Amino acid sequence: MKKVIYLSGPITGYKSTSFQEFAHMQEKIEAMGFRVLNPHELCRFINPSDYLKPELYWEACMRVCLASLPYAHVVVTLKDWELSKGAKKEVAIARETGFIEVVHFVTFLNPSYHAATLN
């Protein structure tokens, strides 16, 4: 069974660079043999123009992302995740469950981490 990795990081206010950063990290992690839940992909079917206010669109995306979180084995936090209201919520929920590990991307990409914990 492939482990499922959820990517958590800033999106709102970072849209131009965030998409590429999430896609790049997804590609790296999938090349390592894991499945990836990418919030950009999870929310691609939600149309921002269907919402009167940007915060309502954000809430709709968060509902989808938070509903996907229990399927993950590990939450990998990306650069500046702690500046994101949504990422902080994802990390807090993952930690509250006690069965979803939270790891920074630098640690996650380190081969010695995998040898010791994930395989």
Image: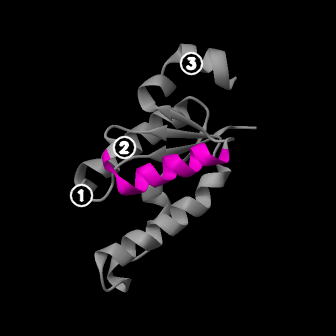
Q: Quadrant of residue 47?
A: bottom left
Going by the numbered disc 3, the residue's amino acid type is: Tyr
Residue bearing mark 1 = 13
> Callout 1: helix, strand or loop?
loop
Is residue 88 rendered magenta in the image? Answer: yes
Is residue 14 rendered magenta in the image? Answer: no
Q: How many numbered callouts?
A: 3
Task: Tell me where residue 50 appears, x and y as whole percent.
Answer: 38, 85
| Residue 45 seen in render | no
Task: Tell me where residue 48 appears, x and y as whole percent.
Answer: 34, 76
| Residue 30 seen in render | yes
Q: Whole-Å distance between the Cαs marked 3 and 1?
A: 31 Å
> Callout 3: helix, strand or loop?
helix
Residue at 65% from the left image edge and 53% from the top image edge: 70
Residue bearing mark 2 = 81
Q: Whole-Å distance between the Cαs marked 3 and 2?
A: 20 Å
Residue at 37% from the left image edge and 56% from the top image edge: 85
Q: Whole-Å distance between the Cαs marked 1 and 2?
A: 12 Å
Decide which of tag 3 and tag 1 comes sooner along the chain: 1
Q: Give the colour scheme shown.
A: one colour
Query: Quick check: 42 left or right of 69?
Result: left
Magenta stretch: dominant secondary structure: helix
Going by the numbered disc 2, the residue's amino acid type is: Trp
User: Magenta residues?
Assistant: 83-97
Disc 1: CA contacts within 10 A as few (<14), some (14-19) or many (>=20): few
Decide which of tag 1 and tag 2 comes sooner along the chain: 1
> Callout 2: helix, strand or loop?
helix
Disc 3: CA contacts within 10 A as few (<14), some (14-19) or many (>=20): few
Task: Tell me where residue 11 appears, x and y as whole percent.
Answer: 33, 55
Decide which of tag 3 and tag 2 comes sooner along the chain: 2
Residue at 44% from the left image edge and 31% from the top image edge: 105
Residue bearing mark 3 = 113
